[in-house]
Image (tube, grey):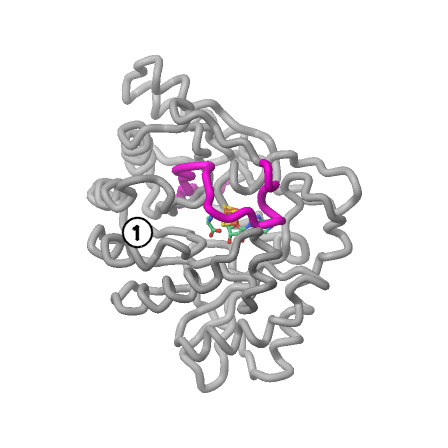
Amino acid sequence: MKQLIDPFGRKIEYLRISVTDRCDLRCSYCMSEDVEFLPRQDILSFEEIIRLAKSFALLGVTKIRITGGEPLMRKKLPELIASIKAIEGIEEVVITTNGTLLTQYAKPLFEAGLSRLNISLDTLQADRFKTLTRRDRLQAVLDGIEEAKKYPFESIKLNAVVMRGMNDDEIIPLADFAIANDIDITFIEEMPLGEVGYDRSVTFLSSAEIKSEIEKKYSLESSSYKTGGPAVYCNVENQKTKIGFISPHSNNFCSDCNRVRITAVGRLLLCLGNENSQDLRTTLRAGCSDEDLTEQLISALQLKPEKHNFDLGEEVKILRFMSHTGG
Ligand code: SAM
Ligand code: SF4
């Protein structure tokens, strides 16, 4: 079987697909208030996404994460998830969502075969949520989490980006919330993607600082638990909850990178912190054969850089926002 192996010997088994650039929130670290969304015809159709997923599955990809923008803004998403889940070789379909639409979609997502849900939540304070996301939707997210808990997903995990002076006083309350709900939580160092109007070197907080804050209340021990992503987990003494840390700055995780991304417009992105990419949409729309598509994916892998290069200096090097990339 042909496989996706990059020049550094890393095997790609995990694909993240952004299904839309649209979102019902405007998180300040992710997009600007006056963001212009792409014309619909530029976005990959479900048929195009499924065709790509099949090609990747034939090359050894077993896990697909659906993301965005806000993936649940894409109409009939559960149908897409069921189609991807049915592809031979795909073992897991998971999603990253802001949670605002889960009261409506948790059940159809579960029935479609979704294995795991990551729900982004950076604050439990309604006013702060409104400031951070520019929308008054905290209660919708909390209701969405409650709804998701009714279904036996393999896991429900919270993702919190921690920023000094913005929400770092909520590290313990967010951990408390995850523990009270028997769900996992991952704390993420902010990445310098896109120009956001504040200096990210001031708001940056390392995973080590976040961890030592949590240890003021909880006893953590290292865990070998892995979900195929970059998070490093700890067990919390006497609790079911695992606490994870994603440290793009302080602990470069590139050496065991196993993933690539497809943006909403069908660009294959080889690394989050680098602009190396290939336009797959043009290939698809030119009516390529399955063999040509496979060959293009294999040769594109040669563009995968050894590691990302995030720099918190004043000059923003990566101009694309996470919402364009697919988090
Ligand atoms: N809308 C969905 C959501 O918010 O979960 C999915 C897409 S969002 C781009 C995926 C993840 O990227 C979210 O957890 C978000 O917090 C994170 N994210 C966005 N911009 C980021 C940045 N500059 N640094 C670190 N994480 C970021
Ligand atoms: Fe939307 Fe997710 Fe970006 Fe927030 S992080 S603006 S919810 S895409």
Q: Residue furthest top?
A: 286
Asked if one can make out residue 114 in the rendered structure from this viewpoint, the answer is yes
Residue 253 position (above or below residue 232): above
Residue 6, position in %: x, y?
49, 35
Residue 138, position in %: x, y?
48, 62
The residue tagged with tag 1: helix, strand or loop? strand
Residue 107 position (above or below residue 5): below
Residue at the image point whose x is 23% and y is 53% from the top: 108
Is residue 69 magenta-colored?
no
Q: Give the labeled residue for mark 1.
A: 92
Q: Quadrant of residue 145?
A: bottom left
Residue 274, position in %: x, y?
61, 35
Q: Quadrant of residue 207?
A: bottom right
**Most foreground residue, 45 or 269:** 45
10 Å crowding of disc 1: few (<14), some (14-19), many (20+): some
Q: Quadrant of residue 44?
A: top left
Direction from residue 132 to residue 53 in the image, left or right = left
In the picture, the quarter occupied by the N terminus is: top left
Q: Which residues are magenta?
A: 9-34
Check disc 1 and give the amino acid type: Glu
Direction from residue 108 to residue 120 in the image, left or right = right
Asked if one can make out residue 259 in the rendered structure from this viewpoint, the answer is no
Direction from residue 250 to residue 238 in the image, left or right = left
